[in-house]
Image (tube, rainbow, N blue to C red):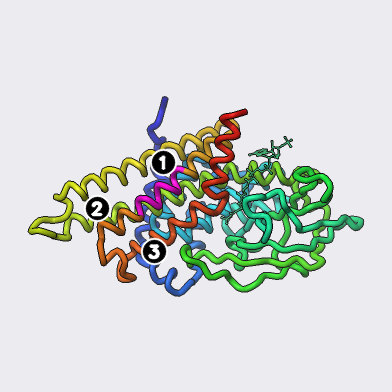
Amino acid sequence: MQIDLTDEQRLLQDTCRDFAARELTPNAKRWDREHKFPQEAVKKAFELGLGGVAVPEEFGGAGMDNVSYALAIEEISRGCASVGVTLSVNNSLYCDPLVKYGTAEQKERFLKPFARGEKLGCFGLTEPQAGSDAAEQRTVATRKGDVYVVNGTKNWITNGPVADAMVVFTMTDLSKGTKGITAFVVETAAPGFLRQKADEKLGICASPSCTIFFENLEIPASQRLGQEGDGFKIAMGTLDGGRIGIAAQAIGIGRAAFEEARDYSKVRQTFGVPIAQHQAIQFMLADMATELDAARLLTLRAASMKDRGVRHSRESAMAKLYASEAANRVADKALQIHGGMGYSKELDIERHFRDARITEIYEGTSEIQRIVISSALLK
Ligand code: CAA
């Protein structure tokens, strides 16, 4: 089994690490405080080819693999978790279904500018009553000639306030359950696409999300992704890839917390020695590093299965479940190692602690990942 990175993967990892250290880490605290979407930093990340890392070059992407994508999201999230999820949503949740299901015309208009990073995408699955139970879609699309008329509500839409287009899921036949769900791609500037004010959240405060109302939004039939009724499988398959991105984001957050705790433990003194000399601290650091490495191996395994075209629902769920829970344990220990300073807004630790929490919730809660894993085990 080959677990070494290729030269190309290492180069991307180093490039993203340098970029994060230069452009993200020094500013992330301020963006978080100001709840500011760091548009310029996202633009610079896009200029590095991070709009569509694994999107083929012919469709505007960097043409790399999903292992590279996971490495990139980890490095970016180590600098700023909000920028990490902004990129992850554009790559996995928006571009990926267009690569797989988009027609040539849809790819030209709705994929290329997004994979090139000139525009930003979002993903409209969640509704007020359809979070974990994604099949409970209530947004209805009714066909009228060459268009579908869409009415309904989506919420918690990451990138929603700033995105140029959305991959959106609707019910075209309420009597058919999951087989009545249909996907479309639509511009956010279309009449009837009504964005509400940005959500106020505990963490990832520089990643804007919002509720969106559709009021007689007309979507041309030519913007349907796949056939009527394909939507649920498109959503689930897309999330299999998205969960790799969130696992990588969680590892990036955990690494930031771990590295800051490790460095702090070498300078903070108690009882006449640096706290790194106390076995209590050494054991915490050992556990943190081990969990992060285990999370990365699970994540890269899922990414490499995706690269090989093998079904990876279970492996992505395992990676996302383990990485998100590990990131929270790591952030908690990092805060403990910092003592009172960890609880203070002066340092970044409290932000990592808050940012880590969402990774156990979005793109499927930990409980949903356990459902996905156990149903694969018991098939
Ligand atoms: N790939 C392809 N097909 C799949 C699939 C997958 N990964 N998962 C399920 N399917 C298929 C099944 O095979 C089944 O097909 P048949 O009817 O032909 O047999 C069909 O879909 C229905 O499957 P289930 O019976 O398993 O569906 P369910 O209603 O029980 O739901 C669930 C399964 C796993 C709980 C699902 O609802 C789920 O993943 N929920 C969580 C939703 C989620 O992750 N939301 C995240 C929103 S996006 C977000 O968070 C973005 C952000 O902010 C960053």
Rendering coords of residue 148 (x, y %): 84, 57
Q: At x 24% / y 52%, what residue is drawn?
A: 262
Q: Is residue 257 left or right of residue 309?
A: left
Q: Is residue 246 left or right of residue 375?
A: left
Q: At x 56% / y 31%, what residue is drawn?
A: 308
Say whether residue 321 is magenta: no
The amino acid sitting under disc 3 is Arg
**Discs 3, 2 touching: Cβ within 8 Å:** no
Up the image or down, 284 lies above or below 38; here it is above
CA distance separating discs 2 and 1: 19 Å
Query: Magenta region: which residues?
Result: 322-331
The amino acid sitting under disc 1 is Arg
**Residue occupied by mark 3:** 351
Location of the N terminus by quadrant is top left
**Residue occupied by mark 1:** 296
Q: Which residue in the rendered view is the most extreme toward the top? A: 1
Q: At x 13% / y 56%, what residue is drawn?
A: 274
Location of the C terminus by quadrant is top right
Say if disc 1 is inside 8 Å of ligand 1. Answer: no
Q: Which residue in the rendered view is the most extreme toward the left? A: 272
Q: In the rendered structure, find residue 262 and report the number of the disc placed on it.
A: 2
Q: Which tag is nearer the camera, tag 3 or tag 1?
A: 3
Q: Is residue 194 left or right of residue 292?
A: right
Say whether residue 327 is magenta: yes
**Discs 2, 1 touching: Cβ within 8 Å:** no
Local crowd size for mark 2, using a 10 Å CA cut-off: few (<14), some (14–19), many (≥20): many
